[in-house]
Image: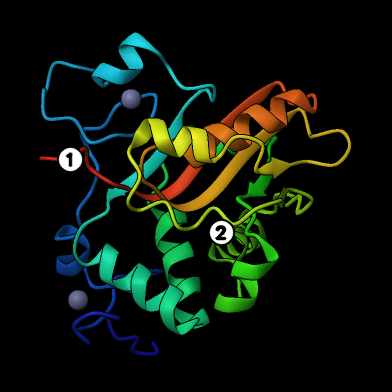
Amino acid sequence: MVYSPCFLCHAAAARGEDFCQPCLADMPWNHRACLCCALPIADPFSSHCTVCSQAPPPFEFAVANFRYAYPIDHLLLRYKQHGDEVLGAKLARLMLNSLSEDTLFQLSEATLIPVAMHPQDLRKRGFNQAQQLADSIAAQISLPVDNRLLATRTHSAQKSLNAAQRHQNLRGVFHFPGQAPKHCVIVDDVITTGATVSAVTQQLKQRGSEQISVLCLARTPAPGH
Ligand SMILES: [Zn+2]
Ligand SMILES: [Zn+2]
């Protein structure tokens, strides 16, 4: 058998994985998360975060199998800053391998919709990480990808904004030309506040989509956690 090294520590990788078993076990798994928005939650008796129990987001549910913490945050930054497509493919495989049977079943009839980047941001980075993740996942489980979503303004400089400002800043950013697929799964690398995927959801609903969920690699914990 061909020896394949763990991407992080160079020990032998687990079968079908790019990482070894101990590195996989040490990943920041998002086991205790809001069933609706995937926000990591501390209370073991809650199924939903306080935000979703009061005002659920427009999508049905989000899946993020990792918290945005070490080493996932480092790997994602390296991928995005250096355009390391080999690493991008490994992250897509990690994302896919960590999905439950239930989630895979729920995805089976869906069309993947990568979160769009404004052409100006795309030129700067050279690629859209959401697009690459969606393409790799689609190729591995034979799902269609619909690339028609457009970002009419740049929406990447949101780091300094709070949740309400982000929602405001994203108003009217996304445009889906024509009829959207009935069952959509929005794909992104990280959910921070959920404002971006909520804005995409609203646009897809306006274009006729009936069932919308979200798939991403990592979810940022709430401030202070
Ligand atoms: Zn390792
Ligand atoms: Zn929630």
Relative to the observer, which residue lies in front, 58 or 146? 58
Residue drawn where x is 55% and y is 40% of the image: 170
Relative to the observer, which residue lies in front, 3 or 152? 152
Residue drawn where x is 19% and y is 54% of the image: 28
**Residue at image mark 2:** 130
| Rendered image: mark on residue 223 | 1
For label 1, the crowd category at 10 Å Cα-Cα, with few meaning under 14, some 14 to 19 and many 20 or more, is few
The picture places residue 100, in percent across and down from the top left corner, at 41, 40
> Which amino acid, mark 1?
Pro
Q: CA gap, disc 1 to disc 2?
A: 24 Å
Q: In which quarter of the image is ligand 1?
A: bottom left
> Which amino acid, mark 2?
Ala
Residue drawn where x is 42% and y is 66% of the image: 91
The picture places residue 66, in percent across and down from the top left corner, at 29, 50
Element carrying mark 1: loop
The picture places residue 218, in percent across and down from the top left corner, at 35, 51
Quadrant housing the C terminus: top left
Q: Quadrant of residue 137?
A: bottom right
For label 2, the crowd category at 10 Å Cα-Cα, with few meaning under 14, some 14 to 19 and many 20 or more, is many
The picture places residue 35, in percent across and down from the top left corner, at 35, 24
Residue 80 to residue 64: above or below: below
> Which mark is nearer the camera, 1 or 2?
1
Side of 14 where 27 appears, left or right: left
Let me know if residue 175 appears in the view.
Answer: yes
Side of 107 where 195 appears, left or right: left
Let me know if residue 103 appears in the view.
Answer: no
If you read the primary sequence from the N terminus, does the residue marked by circle 1 or circle 2 appear first? 2
Relative to the observer, which residue lies in front, 182 or 26? 182
